[in-house]
Amino acid sequence: MSRTVAAVHETWPLAQVFRISRGSKTAADVIVVTIGEDGVEGRGEAVPYPRYNQTIESSLAEIAAVHRAVEEGASRHELIALMAPGAARNALDCALWDLESRMTGTPVWQLAGLDAPADLVTAYTLSLDSPEAMGAAAAKNADRALLKIKLDGELVLERLAAVRTGAPGARLVVDANEAWSVELLRAIGQDLAALGVEMIEQPLPAGDDAGLAGIDCPVILCADESCHGSDTVASLADRYGMVNIKLDKTGGLTEALALRDAALAAGREIMVGCMVGTSLAMAPAMLVAQGARVVDLDGPLLMKQDRVPGIAFDGNIMHPAPRDLWG
């Protein structure tokens, strides 16, 4: 077997500044891997994440380290043994799925033994800002069915009250990005429920979330930074009722599907999320997101311009990815 492997860094400007508790960004920096074989090419996109000590440079170096093995025919399952989970493995894994799909003429959902993908309702993310600005952003997007609210540990109720006023009919989920404390969560849990918040994502730091064990919170808690692969599910049972599956954390679609199966078997609810990327990164995640309680794959909606072809959106509704894009 003879393959070619190429990995490039691309920068995609965002429509507006994207702020979370750890900082802000104006562009999405992604890695795109292309794997060619017998005149056919498969692609995968990933987003290195500084929270996990990943950079564009380190991820490209990870890909370079297994370049020869992939050229010589390493499979998706062999990549799991060769590489740590993360953005680099995600890009390679998704490119291998796409390559197999194109070489066999079989959609990835069929290769994976899944049902055909259907439309999904994705959350739309409101960045961290002043209560007034977040209320205005909510009003601008009040027709969206599901809003995800980025927060830190300050003015939590004020910001959420402004959002609720701006978008009285929207479903709300909250992402604290590890910025809260147990004391804050205990103090505001009932207020969050009264505001209609349906889920709180990663309220405490991943390494300091033992305090969630047995906490009486009326809003379901979702593990993001605390949950990476299928081997982490068992340790979350006393803390979280939901897990957020991101392909850049699991290291690809292969392990993301395994994590979904493990989480469902353990009685956890499923959320499928993303880093800020283009439709090429969302397409494989959409397969994992079928049937998920919360879908957060709005990366293309945050872009100044998406790939062509890309995923078609009608407001919050995502249509299945065109095969010219991926899979």
Image (cartoon, rainbow, N blue to C red):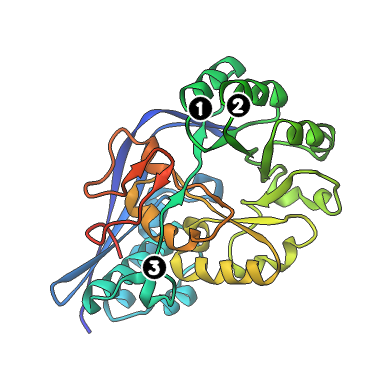
- Name the quadrant containing residue 241: bottom right
Q: What number is the disc on residue 74?
A: none
Looking at the picture, which amino acid does disc 1 mark?
Ala
Where does label 1 land, which residue?
Answer: 142
Where does label 2 land, which residue?
Answer: 168
Q: Are marks 1 and 2 in contact (CB under 8 Å)?
A: yes
Name the quarter where the N terminus is drawn. bottom left
Q: Locate residue 54 relative to residue 188 in the image: left or right.
A: left
Residue found at the very far front of the displayed protein: 169
Looking at the picture, which amino acid does disc 3 mark?
Ala
Query: What is the spatial separation of the Cα atoms under label 3 and label 1, in whole angstroms?
Result: 31 Å
- Name the quadrant containing residue 213: bottom right
Query: What is the spatial separation of the Cα atoms under label 1 and label 2, in whole angstroms?
Result: 7 Å
> Which mark sits nearer the N-terminus, 3 or 2?
3
Q: Which element is circle 1 on?
A: loop
Where does label 3 land, which residue?
Answer: 116
Residue found at the very far left of the displayed protein: 39
**98 versus 201 height, above or below:** below
Q: Locate residue 37 relative to residue 173 in the image: left or right.
A: left
Is residue 122 something that shows in the picture? yes
